Amino acid sequence: MGRRRIIFATGNEGKMREVRMILADMELDPVSMKEAGIEADIVEDGATFEENAAIKARTIMELTGEIVLADDSGLEVDYLNGEPGVYSARYMGENTPYTIKNNHIIELLRDAKGEERSARFVSAIACAFPDGEVITVRGTIEGVIGYEEKGENGFGYDPIFYVPELGMTTAQLPPERKNEISHRGKALRLMKECLKERGI
C-alpha cells in the first residue's frame, strides 16, 4: 500500500514546504492544487479563518472526491482592531508586494509603543472528507509588530512579526524552528492528531 494522496488547497510553495515537513512521518503524500492539476476560483467570503478554510477544503473535495486540507491564516494587529485579519492576503490589493503591506502596517503603528504593538498570527486548518464531514483546528502565535522588516526566511508578514521571547522575527527563524512554534505548525500538528484518530 503506497502513500495516500492528500490535497492541500493552496498554490503557495512556502506553505507546501511547511506542510510536507510536518506531515513527513505520516503515510501521506501532500500535493498542492497545482500538482493535482486543479484550477478553481474559490470565493472566500467567510467571516472567520475557520469558515474560509472550510469553504476552500469543501470546494476542492467536491471537485475531486478526495480528502482535502486547506488553511486560512492571517495577521491580527490589536492596534488596528484586529486588521488585516481574514483580509490578510487581500490587504491593500491581492497583488501588492508584502514589502509594501509590511511597511504600511509599520507606518500605521508609528505612534504605538510596547504592548500597543501586540499582534498574533492565526491559522485555521480545515479537512474535508469525501463523506461530507469537515473538521477545523486553530493555531496561534503571539508577538509584536517590529519597527522594520527583518529576516529572509518565511514569507508574507513574517519580516515584521517579532517574537519577544525569541528576540527575532519569524522571518529570521530557521524553517525547522519556525514549524515548531508557528501558528500553521501548531494547527497542522493538531490536524495531524485528528487524522490519526480517524486512521488516516
Image: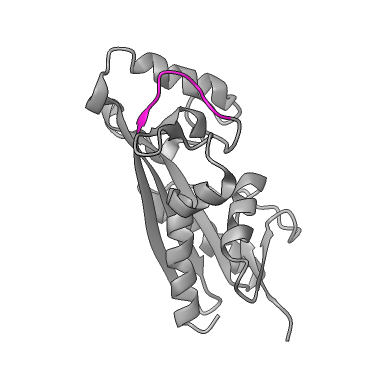
Q: In which quadrant is the N terminus drawn?
A: bottom right
Give x and y (percent) for residue 169.
Answer: 46, 33
Direction from residue 90 to residue 108 in the image, left or right: left
Give x and y (percent) for residue 97.
Answer: 59, 25
Residue 54 visible in the shown view: no
Residue 145 part of the magenta-drawn span? yes
Give x and y (percent) for residue 4.
Answer: 67, 76
Magenta part mainly helix, strand or loop?
A: loop
Give the residue furthest to the bottom: 1
Choose top left, top right, bottom left or bottom right for residue 197.
bottom left
Residue lying at 61% horizontally and 28% vertically, measured from the top left: 95
Direction from residue 100 to residue 108 in the image, left or right: left
Residue 50 part of the magenta-drawn span? no
Viewer-closest of 143 and 64: 143
Viewer-closest of 182 and 76: 182
Q: Is residue 64 above or below residue 101?
A: below
Give x and y (percent) for residue 82.
Answer: 30, 34
Give the residue furthest to the left: 115
- The count of marks equals 0
Residue lying at 45% horizontally and 18% vertically, measured from the top left: 104
Q: In which quadrant is the C terminus drawn?
A: bottom right
Residue lying at 50% horizontally and 34% vertically, measured from the top left: 158
Residue 56 visible in the shown view: yes
Direction from residue 164 to residue 159 in the image, left or right: right
Q: Is residue 129 above or below residue 182?
A: below
The residue range painted magenta reads: 144-151
Q: Is residue 123 above or below residue 112?
A: below
